[in-house]
Image (cartoon, grey):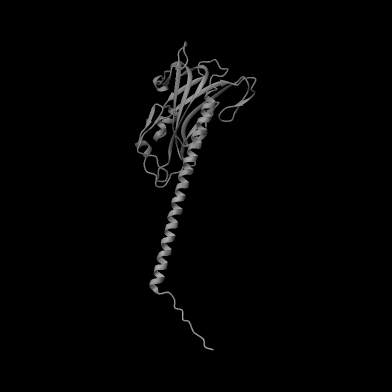
Amino acid sequence: MSTSRFRQSGLSLIELMISVILGLLLVAGATQIFLANTQAFRLQDNISRTQESGRLGLEILLADLRRAGMDYSNVDAVVGANGSATVATNTGLLTNSDEVTIKYTVPDEIGAMSDCEGNTVAPGSIVTNRYFVKMDTNPAIPALFCSGSGGAGTALVRGVESFQVQYGVADAASVGNGFISAEKYVTAGAATLVNVASIRVGLLMRSEASVQGLVAPKDSIVVLDTTVTDTALAAVKVNGSFPIHRYFSGMAVMRNAVKGTL
């Protein structure tokens, strides 16, 4: 009985180098796919968060604005200000933001309510809520604030770059003649009494985080009566990259025209 010996030789250096290169190419391709998927996830996550914040801001504002003048007969149920001193000390887009103060009485049949800062307001007492924009902290980002009962204010929604308000005014005989900006009525130290039939609000939102690879904005965004230029948008960066910007608007119709100073 004879036996045969089989000799097995190893890989040559060239074959080994080709195998290593092919492996590196596969790893590089998988890494690129992983990075692309991660980037797409971060982009979608930032868009979703920004949209949620914008919708939340509108819901809070419009729900409260519809209460303006409820069981309240004084002339200052709505008070508007354009580019007020509250935000003028901040830089960037915040200098163009408006603010609005609304008042209404808590009906006896409803029971106690809360102002926008969570302070309890008893039936028959007046709720006073002032909405404005300023910088929030940790980390610094512009936010929609509300001050109730004369408080310092609480940040309701972060990422609000610009907050604009327009008022639908009406004369004594007709309600709802259209929208006129508060800027056309308000000057320093002077105010005009009008009948407010409806209120429009616009919010320019940005994501709290930046998105790697996002290019500078090339178009302006019109927020009601205010144009935010592409140059101003491009000046906003987070850790050297651009955030996402989205615009939201909505309207609150007063049950009856209320008295306001604009």
At 49% from the left and 32% from the top, the residue drawn is 144
In the displayed structure, would residue 248 be above or below residue 197? below
Q: Quadrant of the C terminus?
A: top left
Expressed as whole percent of the image width and height from the top left, the position of residue 245 reads 42, 37
Q: In the image, what residue occupies the spot 45% across and 17% down? A: 169
The residue lying toward the viewer, choosing from 31 and 2, is 2
Residue 173 place in picture, x, y as percent = 47, 10
At 45% from the left and 25% from the top, the residue drawn is 165
Residue 70 in the image: x percent, y percent? Answer: 56, 19
Q: In the displayed structure, does residue 67 sit left or right of residue 212? A: right
The answer, for residue 65, to whether it is visible in the render is yes
Could you say where residue 243 lies in the image, as x and y percent from the top left? 42, 41
- Image quadrant in which you'd find residue 220: top left
Above or below, 168 relative to 153: above
- For the N terminus, the image quarter is bottom right
Q: How many discs appear? A: 0
Pick the residue in front: 69 or 218: 218
On screen, residue 91 versus residue 68, left or right, reads left
State the residue lying farthest toward the top. Answer: 173
